[in-house]
Amino acid sequence: MTQAPPGWFPDPAPPTPGQPPMVRYWDGHQWTEHVQPSETRPMYGAPPVRPAGFPPAAGPTTPDGVPLAGWWHRVAAFLLDSIVLSIASSIVTLPLQLGAEHRMQDVLDRYQQQLDGSGATSDFGTFLGDYLDALGPILRWSLVVSFLLWLVYSEIFLRTKGATPGMMVLGIGVRLRATPGQLRWSTIFVRVLVQQGVGLLALLSIPLYLALSWFPILDGLWPLWNKRRQAIHDIAAQTNVVRTR
C-alpha cells in the first residue's frame, strides 16, 4: 500500500467519552499532535480533510497515535548530549582534578621511594588505600557535578523545547505518555534522578556506587524489551520518547 499524502484523517486514537469525532493531521510520514473536530474546516494552508482511508502508524505509538522513537535514535541523542556535558563537567571540576593529580602523585612518589630504599619493604595494601583516598574526592564531586549539569540541562531544554539538543538533532523529543504538552519541572526532575542519580550514591559510599554502577546500563537497555519503548526513568516519570519528524 502506498503511503498517504499529508492531510487530515480520522483520529486513530480512541475517542474520549462525549467528545465529537476528531481528525488528526498526517504529515506524510507520521501522525502529528494537531487534532480538531471533524466538522470544522482545516487551518489556512492545510490540506483538506479526507473523510476515510487514514494510514496506520508504523510501530508502537503513544495512546494518541504519536510514533515512538527507536532505540538507536535514543542512544545517539544520549551520546551527543553526553559529549557536551562531559566537556562542561571537565571544565567545572578542573581545579579538583589538578588537586587530585598532585595528591596521587605524592602517593606514587612515596611508594616508589619505598621500593627504591635499601632494605625497605613496600606495603601495596597501604599504597592502594592511600591512592584511593586521594582519588575519592575527585570521583565523588565529578559524579555530583555531572548529575547537577544533567539536571539543569534537562530542565531547561525539556521544559522549553521538549527535547535536548542531542534529541533535536536526531528528530526525537520527550512528552508525557498519556497527554501531549509542556513537561512539568517535577516530571523532568524524576526522569533525571532515576537516569543519573546513581552517581549521588558516591557521596555516601564509593563501594555502594560501584556496586550499583550497572544500573544506568540496564536503564538504557530497557526500551529494547519494553512494549512501550520506555526506559526505567521513563516509567518512573510516565514519559515517552517520540519521533518529532
Image (tube, rainbow, N blue to C red):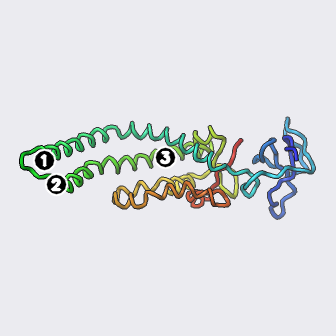
Place residue 97 in its image quadrant: top left
Upstream in sequence: badge 2 or badge 1: 1
Q: Position of residue 132 (x, y in %)?
A: 27, 52
| Lateral position of residue 181 relative to residue 76, left or right | right
Outermost left residue: 119
Up/down of 86 relative to 124, above or below: above
Q: CA distance from mark 2 to mark 1?
A: 9 Å
Q: Amino acid at mark 2?
A: Asp
Q: CA distance from mark 3 to mark 1?
A: 43 Å
Q: How many marks?
A: 3
Q: Is residue 147 left or right of residue 101?
A: right
Name the residue located 79 percent from the left edge and 51 percent from the top edge.
57
Q: In the rendered image, which residue does mark 1 sit on?
A: 114
Q: Which residue is mark 2?
A: 123
Q: Where is residue 15? Give x, y as percent.
A: 82, 60
Residue type (three-letter) at the residue carrying disc 3? Trp
In the image, what residue type sits under mark 1? Gln
Q: Residue at image x 55%, y 54%?
A: 220
Q: Secondary structure at mark 2?
A: loop
- Residue 150 numbered tag: 3
User: How crowded is the residue under tag 3: few (<14 C-alpha within 10 Å), some, or many (20+)?
Assistant: many
